[in-house]
Each structure stands twice: as structure tokens, then as C-alpha cells.
Amino acid sequence: MCGAKAGGPDLAGVDVASETIIQGSVTRDGEPVSGYVRLLDEGGEFTAEVPTSATGQFRFFAAPGTWTLRALVPGATVDRVVAATRGAVAEVAIAV
Amino acid sequence: MSRSDVLVSADWVQDNLDTPNVVLVEVDEDTAAYDKNHIRNAVRIDWKKDLQDPVRRDFIDQAGFEALLSAKGISNDDTVVLYGGNNNWFASYAFWYFKLYGHGDVRLLDGGRKKWELDSRDLVDGAEVPNRPATDYKAKAVDNTIRAFRDDVVAAIGNKNLVDVRSPDEFSGRLLAPAHLPQEQSQRPGHVPSARNIPWSKNANDDGTFKSDEELKALYEAENVDLAKDTIAYCRIGERSALTWFVLHQLLGQTNVKNYDGSWTEYGSLVGVPIELGSN
């Protein structure tokens, strides 16, 4: 696998209109990083966690509102706040 | 029972990769993760294909468990160490299975696959699979003292501890599944009335390792769970609540704790049962 792809995973087959999607990629110096991304709710509570794909990508199916993404990779933890709305895709690029 | 009887560190696993009678077993939510890579000498149990009845919604039976473990080359006197992704959700679920069928020595790798990866420890290619000769495994009769059924849950409303270990958004009815899964589901959202929402994640540190016994006791006390009373834990399909069951039953030594594996996908589909919406 060479290089990171911009944005989150391909949306083919996903019912975007009825879902509230947060997705993106985790990179270090432009290269995809193998690690985990967790989704925290407005109270900071864990809601879900996924491993990043081979191209550094991740995706969540959330509910409308404000969320925090926390990237966990060897040696680093990075938080990003994101607002999500139904029927839209919130794209988040996380550099660690 | 003490913590070290049921939980081992990544260092311990590293030191015991070649120890006879120690069998490492990977159980992932993503059943293909093992094919990508895994800890050296680990075998795989597939929670969907290996642990479920292929037709009706239930476990494999005693004979099925015997056939599975025999085929995996696991003996009754082996020390089985389970690990997996997602903070050991499905490894905990498998742990509970091993206890249901009476396996003597089964443990979890603290932190599971994530901790192993975040430590940058070695994984071998998915094609490198250990050669374990088949055994003649004998399971015990299923131990239903650690398993709750739907009628137990309905009967527990208002008088036993019901611990809903899903995320606050699932508990309140805002989400129907963990947020890495699509949300369209057939069951009604919400929770069992009188359940306390204590997300499984409060048991664990960010790296997936369990909090200390003192921290865990303090957590349940602060949430007003009287551990002297019988407790039923549930989530969506019973794997996250197996993790909380592990904490209460195995780490804190509470023997009166059951896991409701039907969980919300069953309860939220039942006709006529009470459901509550909103947070605690």
C-alpha cells in the first residue's frame, strides 16, 4: 500500500441520506498510520472505536451533534472536534 | 481467584509464545483481522462461524464446543489465553463461553490486540498458522448460572441490578448500534427500565487494559450498584456485556452476575415489554 488516500473510505453501498457519517484518515508526514480512532460523545464518553485501514482511513455512523475523534497510534494521541449532521459526510483529516 | 489467574500482561504473553500447554487464541469482531496478521503461534476462533449455531439464534452446544476445541488442538489442561481487537470485546465473549463450558484455565491478554499493536510488538503474517494436532476435548455441561435469558431480565426490572454497558447514546435511544456500524435496525431504541448505564469503556484505560480492582470497585459503588444483589449485564449482542461480566465476576469475584447475550437486539424486539428512553 503506497501513500495515504485523501478523505475517508469509499461510500459505495452506504445509505448516506439516512446516516450521520464521520470519516477521514490518520497520517504522519503524509503517510497513513496504523492505529485506532475512537469516537467520544459530548460528555467525553466512549461511543465507538475502529482500527485504521491500510490506507489510514476510518468511518463512524453517529448521530447529529458534536463529537470528538481521538486517534491512538504508537507514541501519540491526537483529538479533533467534529460537528456531524444527518445525510452529510463530515470528513476529518488527522495528522499525528 | 485473583486477577493474575484470569488476566495476563503483554510481557507475559511475549515470554510464553513457545510455552507448551499455553495456547494463544485470537477472537476478533473483524473476523478477517487474523488473516492480515496475528501474534505468533495464535490460533483463531471466529465468533460468528465457530461459536454460533448456524441456523437458530443460540450458542453451539456442548458437542459443538468439544468439536471446535478438539479441531483447534486445545486440550482440557491447556492454559488458554484469549485476545482480540476492540478492547477484547469478543475475546471476553469467548472467555465467557469457555467458562460456560467449564474450561479450567482461561485468561485474557490485558489490552488485547490494540495494546499489543500500540506497544509496537511483533505480529506475523496471516498465512503463518501454527500446526496444532487435533485433541479429544471434553466440555462440561453448560453452566447457565452465568447466563441470563429474556424472562430473567423482565423479572429483574426494579429489583435486581441491571447494568446496561452500551454507550450513553445507545442507552438513551439516540443510537441503535455502536457508532462503527450502520444505524438502521429493526428493534426499538432505549433501555430496560431501572437499568443503570455504566458503559463498558469505564472499565478500561485508553489502551484497552483494565483499570485496577480498586478503581473498578469505586466505579460501581459510585454508580450505586449494590454488588450484594444479583446483577445482569447486557449490551446490544452480549459481547461488551461479557467484558463487564468479566470485570464483575472474574476480577471483582462477584459470583451472582450473569451476562444477557440476547441483549438489546432481542429485548428491543420483544412485543409488549417495557422500554425507557433518555439517560440515567
Image: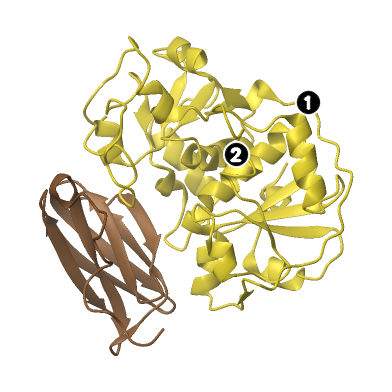
Considering the numbered disc 1 on the image, is that residue within a helix, a strand or a loop?
loop
Q: Position of residue A35 (x, y in %)?
A: 41, 72
Q: Amino acid at mark 2?
A: Leu
**Left or right: where does residue B2 sit relative to residue B227?**
right
Q: Position of residue B107 (x, y in %)?
A: 69, 51
**Left or right: where does residue B29 sit relative to residue A88?**
right
**Mark number, residue B235:** none
Q: Position of residue A28 (x, y in %)?
A: 32, 85
Quadrant in the rendering for residue B55: top right
First along the sequence among labels 1 and 2: 1
**Left or right: where does residue B30 sit relative to residue A42?**
right
Against B158, residue B115 (above or below) is: below
Q: Chain of mark 1?
A: B
**Residue that mark 2 sits on:** B252
Q: Please name the residue shown 60% across and 39% down the image.
A: B252
> How many marks can you see?
2
Front one among B35 and B229: B35
**Mark number, residue B141:** 1
Q: Position of residue B82 (x, y in %)?
A: 66, 54
Q: Chain of mark 2?
A: B
Against B260, residue A39 (above or below) is: below
Q: Please name the residue shown 24% across and 75% down the image.
A: A94
Residue B234 in sight from this viewpoint: yes
Within 10 Å of the Cα at label 1, are there few (<14), some (14-19), or many (20+) other Cα atoms? Answer: few
The span from disc 1 to disc 2 (Cα, nearest Å) is: 25 Å
Nearer the observer, disc 1 or disc 2? 1
Q: Colour of chain A?
A: brown
Q: Amino acid at mark 1?
A: Ala
Quadrant that contains the C terminus of chain B? top left
Q: Which chain is yellow?
A: B
Within 10 Å of the Cα at label 2, are there few (<14), some (14-19), or many (20+) other Cα atoms? Answer: some
Residue B103 in sight from this viewpoint: no
